[in-house]
Amino acid sequence: MSRASAAASEPRSVGLLARVFPPAPPLPGRRDPLAEFRYAGPLRPVVEGLYLLARNPLAWVAPGVLWALTRVPDPRSILGLVASLVSFAALIGAGWFGWQRPSLFGAAAAILGMLLIVVAVTVLTALQQVPLNALVPPETGAAEIAVAGAVYIALYGLIGLLSGWYGGYLRRRQAQVGAQRQASARRR
């Protein structure tokens, strides 16, 4: 027996994450979202992700806009608390509806939402002619503001990635449970 076939026949160890969240099967009745994708170049993962986002923009644009809108209320109010819950539901929903790559859709929604907030703040301060030092301490430089913005985009991108993954996981798990119920109902 060759080394490759021996390695293939050995059971793979299952990590803690796979034990807590066992892999769910693909959604039944859905065709391969990459069936028509033909790019084979060196940036295939990046182009593949952009292809999927372009094919289903509503799954990440609508949650991204909703997420940005939920950042408006004061987080210390009851409305802010509800908005916070809605913001996470929007990112989970991006993963639910972006079943092709839930993590990608959740991250794209969060990053879009953060970029919308940055644009809105920039436009509003320009229209109202508010000086930048009215929003941040005077000793803060433009480079520090840019770094802080990049950190926020990365942080919320990570939160979106995890939330989207969870939404996709829930959808696949629900489909699996539904298929098991149908199979058990047919056996009766």
Image (cartoon, rainbow, N blue to C red):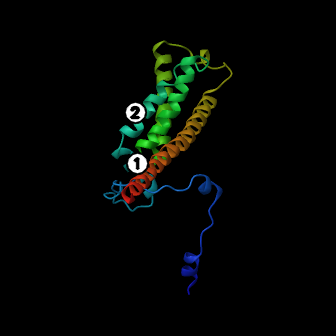
Residue that badge 1 annotates: 50
What residue is drawn where x is 59% and y is 71%? 11
- Which quarter shows the N terminus? bottom right
**Is 85 above or below relative to 125?**
below
Question: Which residue lies most toward the front here?
Answer: 188
Give x and y (percent) for residue 111. 50, 37
Give the CA distance from mark 1 to mark 2: 17 Å
Q: Which residue is mark 2?
A: 62
Res 144 → quadrant: top right
Q: Quadrant of the C terminus?
A: bottom left
**Three-letter amino acid code of the residue under disc 2:** Ala
Could you classify mark 1 by the number of other residues whose Cα lies within 10 Å: few (under 14), some (14-19), or many (20 or more)?
A: few
Which callout, 1 or 2, points at the residue further toward the start of the chain?
A: 1
Where residue 15 sits in the image (x, y, percent)? 64, 59
Please identify the quarter of the rendering in which residue 149 is found.
top right
Taking depth in this image into account, of 101 and 154 the one nearest to the observer is: 101
Percent coordinates x, y for residue 168 in the rendering: 47, 46
Residue 37: percent from left, percent from top:
34, 57
Q: Residue at x 52, y 24 (%)?
A: 83
Residue flagged by tag 1: what amino acid is it? Answer: Leu
Q: Residue at x 42, y 56 (%)?
A: 184
